[in-house]
Image (cartoon, rainbow, N blue to C red):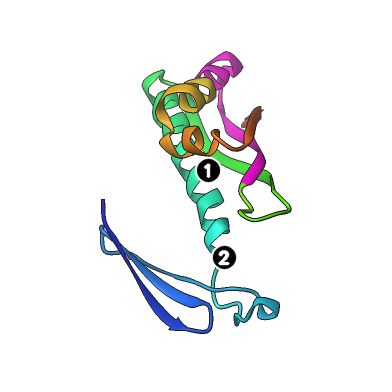
Amino acid sequence: MKAKLKWIDGVCFMAETGSGHAVVMDGAPEGGGRNLGPRPMELVLAGTAGCTSYDVLAILKKSRQDVRDCWVDIDAERADTEPKVFTRIHFHFVVTGRGVKPDHVERAIKLSAEKYCSASIMLGKTADITHDFEVRELD
């Protein structure tokens, strides 16, 4: 896996991924930025949510669950001192569909957390990671 990062100015950077996608990262004005993009650590958090959601949805699809929507609300805390690593991350999954079985969702989240999601397993080295979920039935 490769990526390229180009400094724009101040604390603003343009990252290009190995798959050819670009994202701007910037800091808050009080840190010398112009708020032109997400902070790098916000992307770490969002990327981790994307990684685990990818797993959860793939597992639910394989178990023939009729999922129509899924999102994750993430709440995280970082250390007060440098390096300000994540110390606590909570993922709250909301799965909407028809006849989605809660035990299938619970199993999918557990498999992602313990076996498949490299991002959350890596962050779990410094952070206490917890999960919960709710299943919403479509009418």
Q: Amino acid at mark 1?
A: Ala
| Residue 62, picture quadrant | top left
- The verdict on residue 97 being magenta is yes
| Residue 103, picture quadrant | top right
Viewer-proximal residue, 69 or 116? 116
- The verdict on residue 126 being magenta is no
| Residue 134, picture quadrant | top right
Q: What SS does tag 1 mark?
A: helix
Q: Locate the C terminus by quadrant.
A: top right
Return the residue at label 1. 49
Residue lying farthest to the bottom in this orientation: 9
Which one is in front in this view, the residue at disc 2 or the one at disc 1? 2
The residue at 55%/39% (across/down) is 70
Return the residue at label 2. 39
Q: In this rendering, would 73 be left or right of 4?
A: right
Span shown in magenta: 86-107
Viewer-proximal residue, 15 or 11? 11
Label 2 Cα crowd, 10 Å radius (few <14 / some 14-19 / many 20+): some
Can you give x and y, in whole percent of width and height, for residue 2 in the image?
Answer: 26, 56
Q: Name the mark on residue 84.
A: none
